[in-house]
């Protein structure tokens, strides 16, 4: 049964369209994940469906009487109210009734009204009539699983992560007919994520969520929607199936564009050889050539980029912990922890929120001092520290200006360098995005830029504290490939199980009371040790195998482009864009009925010259593009 339909919605901010004519449908009990690159409009689509934002065109139609619940990335709670008051406010009569009952129970003898007994009797009768006693037990269970215990504290005193968990609990407790969830696993520890995953699998509700957690969506969802270059693609199946079908789509598109490129070269040669006098038949062919050219320039074959960088030299002494101790009050985070890092180690860190994971990283960086013990760092170690609160940009700066404050060229090894504009493109910042202000970037795009500013400093020891939050799946795959080939050390805190499984050699498990256990293997190995049931996600799962089937860069040595050719290609892209604008403006002047004869003659000549230059630069761009991909 169809629950909700989105029909041809479009949204633009200023002159730049975010997406155009996007359609989708949600069926009863269907569980759908929406994935796309950062800045493509995923969160905007959820806000439009939830009624929090208006589309420029198109419609959202749902069945009468359906209730839609929405969890945004940054929830808007009533900061002056308590946790309990925030959870129980709303239009849900049962929740309101339970909230009134709880409020009556909390009243002291001096606070009670003269008719207190009648109020309490009425509240009990309401819960009886609505069979809501089990409901109250469910509320307590959800709050406990999300580590929400003190319901009296004002929300304004809580962190952003705690507020997100409160908003998530409120949504799950309300149980609307359709749940819209934007990155629901952010700010949850691994135990919470696995609980939520199982809870949503059993929930007989319709779900549409935006998430980058691949194990989560692979387990909890039966449908994947991909927004790619403004078009929506639907895949009935899990993440592994999506990767397989996406691979087929990419290969078909590449084959189609190769045919278009060959046709363009033949038609361009014909255009150059034709006399100026045009027959009707020739004009039709010219129009067809224009359409071919537009299709070629507006479609790019998706290729799997790889990042290579020169790492700073690392000596034999790297990093040593000697009996490190740290506690806050009665909360012991580390107790006599010792470890000596070896060259090239990649270590994951797991544990509940507040167990001390980020504290350990901050002690390495000198931001926090141990209560006892010593941390010794080798003289050749260069840290690259990605922290949860380290992302600070000037909002009026352009993206390329942020990067150029650090360097103009990135050492990619073997005596080769890449200019910063090219390196930005590897991180999915195209030419127009590079010249956008930071204030115009999405949350995920800002995190991608922050990660880039760390990597271009060529560190040999990466300390990554939740690097996967808000990054899109395309960027995560790119980062994974980089880290797999990275020869330095990595210390990683992440709630992304797929990401950790793919990268780490062993895991530091923060077990509480200062105890840290070192387990050799990845996250799945750790789960197998503490779980008696067989693990449904093997270390190298069907997801991983399907991902590896995607088109990858050739392993053999490639000819590629010289430094000079790379620079020329960059200039050509800018020149082609400028010439297309000039051509468009000249055509507008030629179509102006008020233009005099002399101006018409000069404008026509200028149009011919511009068109010729555009053809020449487009052909050269094609030649260099083929060399780059060969």
Image: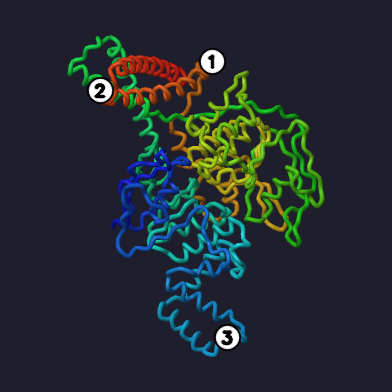
Local SS, label 2: helix
Q: Check residue 564 in the rendering and tell me which mark sits there, or answer none.
A: 1
On screen, 91 above or below 325? Answer: below
| Residue 241 visible in the current orientation | no
- The residue tagged 2 is 287
- The residue tagged 3 is 112
On screen, 138 above or below 406? Answer: below
Residue 38 percent location from the top left of the image: 48, 41
Q: Earlier in the sequence, mark 3 or mark 2?
A: 3
Mark 1 or 2: the one toward you: 2
Q: Check residue 154 in the rendering and tell me which mark sits there, or answer none.
A: none
Q: Label 3 crowding class (10 Å Cα cut-off): few <14, some 14-19, many 20+?
A: some
Mark 3 or 2: the one toward you: 2
Query: Furthest residue to the left?
Result: 280
Mark 1 to mark 2 CA distance (whole Å): 35 Å
Residue at the spot 42% in from the left edge and 15% down from the top edge: 620
């Amino acid at each position: 049964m169809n629950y909700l339909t989105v029909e041809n919605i479009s949204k633009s901010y200023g002159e730049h369209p975010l997406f155009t004519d996007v359609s989708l449908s949600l069926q009863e009990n269907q569980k759908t994940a929406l994935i796309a690159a950062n800045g493509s409009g995923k969160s905007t689509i959820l806000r439009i469906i939830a009624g929090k934002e208006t589309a420029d065109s198109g419609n959202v139609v749902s069945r009468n009487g359906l209730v839609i619940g929405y969890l945004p990335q940054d929830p808007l709670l009533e900061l002056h109210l308590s946790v309990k008051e925030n959870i129980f406010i709303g239009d849900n009569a049962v929740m309101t009734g339970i909230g009134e009952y709880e409020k009556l129970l909390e009243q002291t003898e001096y606070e009670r009204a003269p008719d207190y007994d009648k109020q309490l009797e009425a509240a009990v009768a309401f819960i009886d009539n609505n069979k809501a006693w089990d409901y109250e037990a469910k509320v307590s269970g959800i709050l406990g699983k999300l580590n929400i215990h003190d319901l009296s504290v004002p929300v304004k005193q809580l962190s952003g992560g705690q507020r997100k968990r409160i908003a998530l609990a409120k949504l799950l407790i309300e149980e609307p007919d359709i749940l819209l969830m934007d990155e629901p696993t952010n700010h949850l520890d691994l135990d919470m994520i696995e609980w939520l995953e199982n809870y949503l699998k059993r929930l007989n509700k319709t779900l549409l969520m935006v998430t980058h957690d691949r194990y989560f969506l692979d387990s909890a969802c039966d449908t994947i929607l991909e927004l790619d270059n403004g078009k929506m693609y639907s895949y009935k199946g899990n993440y592994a199936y999506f990767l397989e079908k996406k691979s087929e789509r990419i290969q078909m598109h590449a084959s189609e564009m190769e045919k278009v490129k060959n046709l363009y070269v033949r038609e361009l040669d014909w255009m150059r050889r034709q006399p100026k006098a045009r027959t009707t038949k020739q004009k039709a062919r010219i129009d067809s050539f224009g359409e071919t050219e537009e299709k070629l320039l507006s479609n790019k074959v998706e290729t799997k980029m790889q990042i290579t960088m020169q790492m700073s030299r690392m000596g034999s002494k790297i990093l040593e912990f000697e009996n490190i101790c740290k506690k806050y009050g009665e909360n012991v985070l580390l107790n006599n922890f010792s470890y000596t890092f070896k060259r090239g180690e990649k270590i994951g860190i797991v544990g509940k929120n507040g167990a001390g994971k980020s504290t350990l990283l901050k002690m390495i960086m000198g931001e926090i001092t141990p209560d006892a013990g010593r941390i010794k760092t080798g003289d050749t170690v260069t840290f690259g520290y990605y922290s949860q609160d380290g992302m600070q940009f000037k909002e009026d700066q352009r993206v390329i200006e942020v990067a150029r404050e650090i360097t103009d060229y990135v050492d990619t090894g073997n005596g080769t360098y890449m200019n910063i504009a090219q390196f930005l493109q590897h991180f999915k910042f195209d030419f127009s995005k590079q010249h956008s202000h930071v204030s115009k970037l999405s949350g995920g795009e800002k995190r991608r830029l922050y990660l880039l500013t760390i990597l271009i400093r060529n560190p040999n020891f990466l300390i990554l504290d939740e690097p996967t939050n808000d990054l899109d799946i395309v960027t995560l795959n790119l980062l994974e490939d980089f880290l797999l080939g990275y020869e330095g050390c990595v210390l990683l805190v992440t709630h992304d199980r797929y990401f950790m499984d793919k990268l780490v050699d062993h895991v530091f498990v923060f077990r509480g009371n200062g105890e840290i256990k070192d387990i050799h293997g990845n996250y799945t190995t750790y789960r197998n040790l503490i779980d008696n049931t067989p693990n449904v996600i093997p270390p190298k799962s069907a997801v991983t195998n399907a991902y590896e089937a995607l088109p990858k860069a050739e392993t053999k040595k490639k000819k590629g482009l010289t430094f000079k050719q790379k620079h020329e290609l960059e200039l050509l892209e800018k020149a082609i864009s400028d010439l297309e604008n000039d051509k468009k403006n000249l055509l507008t002047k030629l179509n102006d009925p008020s233009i005099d004869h002399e101006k018409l003659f000069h404008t026509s000549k200028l149009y011919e010259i511009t068109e010729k230059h555009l053809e020449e630069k487009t052909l050269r761009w094609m030649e260099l593009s083929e060399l780059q991909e060969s």
